[in-house]
Image (tube, rainbow, N blue to C red):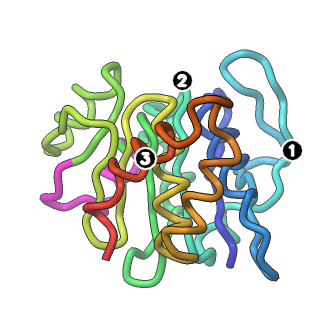
Amino acid sequence: MHIAILTFEGFNELDSLIALGVLNRVKQPGWRVTLSCPTPSVTSMNGVTVRAQSTLAEACAADAVIIGSGIQTRDIANTPEIMAKLRLDPARQLIGAQCSGTLLLAKLGLLGSVPACTDLITKPWVQEAGIEILDQPFYAQGNVATAGGCFASQYLAAWIIARTEGEEAAKSALHYVAPVGEKEEYVSRAMKNIASYLP
């Protein structure tokens, strides 16, 4: 099971790294989570440089993909060379997008008439692409999910874990990262946000 987190120049650390941390709580043989970048390394919006763990081509072959957000997403959406490399397929992949990553999903034609979640800054751009924006942190239909707000990245991660390893595995991963003294409440709230979108 390979889960690729698309991470571009100017990426938002909270989106890519929270998802990476939560997803890596699953300890199953063959379970692999990578930051997938268009170049050998990328630097975040706050100056943190990370090395790519997989390529965009590997992400296109992954079992699940999360499209992270960042301050250059709008430029990426208008860069044909990069967009042409993103051959994602919801018929064979779970695909999630976080905040401005939803704009890339829209531009790739993977949302169709499905409403979506995004952040407040990206909202008008995604609406411009013809997508209805929901005032909620998470929404999924079939194999495509979107989340809005940096801390909503936990919902994308939990959704992927629940879809592939079951709800108990998702609860366990969330329980591990939840604040002490708030674990049950935290896990309950998170699972409530994704429960109605699970098969």
What range of the chain is rendered magenta?
A: 103-115
Q: Can you tell which of label 1 and label 3 is closer to the viewer?
A: 3
Question: What secondary structure is found at the residue carrying circle 3?
Answer: helix
Q: Is residue 177 magenta?
A: no
Residue 56 figure quarter: bottom right
**Does label 1 or label 3 sit earlier along the sequence?**
1
Q: CA distance from mark 3 to mark 2?
A: 32 Å
Residue that label 1 marks: 51
Mark 1 → mark 3, Cα distance in angstroms: 34 Å
Residue 71 circle label:
2
Front in this rendered view, residue 190 or 80: 190
Judge from the rendering whether residue 44 lies leftward or rightward of residue 158; answer left or right. Answer: right
Q: Which percent across, then down, holds residue 79?
A: 49, 43
Identity, as a three-letter code, of the amino acid under mark 3: Ser
**Which residue is depicted at the point 52% across and 36% down?**
69
Closer to the camera in the image, 67 or 135: 135
Looking at the picture, does residue 91 appear above or below residue 50?
Answer: below
Mark 3 touches mark 2? (CB < 8 Å): no
Magenta highlight on residue 110: yes
With 75 as the anchor, is 113 left or right in this view? left
Quarter of the image with the C terminus is bottom left
Q: Quadrant of the N terminus?
A: bottom right
Mark 2 is surrounded, within 10 Å at the Cα level, by few (under 14), some (14 to 19) or many (20 or more) other residues, namely: some
Percent position of residue 37, x then y = 71, 50
Tell me if 128 is positioned left or right of 21 in this view.
left
Q: Looking at the rendered structure, which numbered label has been put on residue 188?
A: 3
Secondary element type, mark 2: loop
User: Which mark sits nearer the N-terminus, 3 or 2?
Assistant: 2
Question: Disc 1, disc 3: CB below 8 Å?
Answer: no
Up-down relation of residue 45 to residue 195 (above or below): above
Type of amino acid at the residue the image marks with label 1: Arg
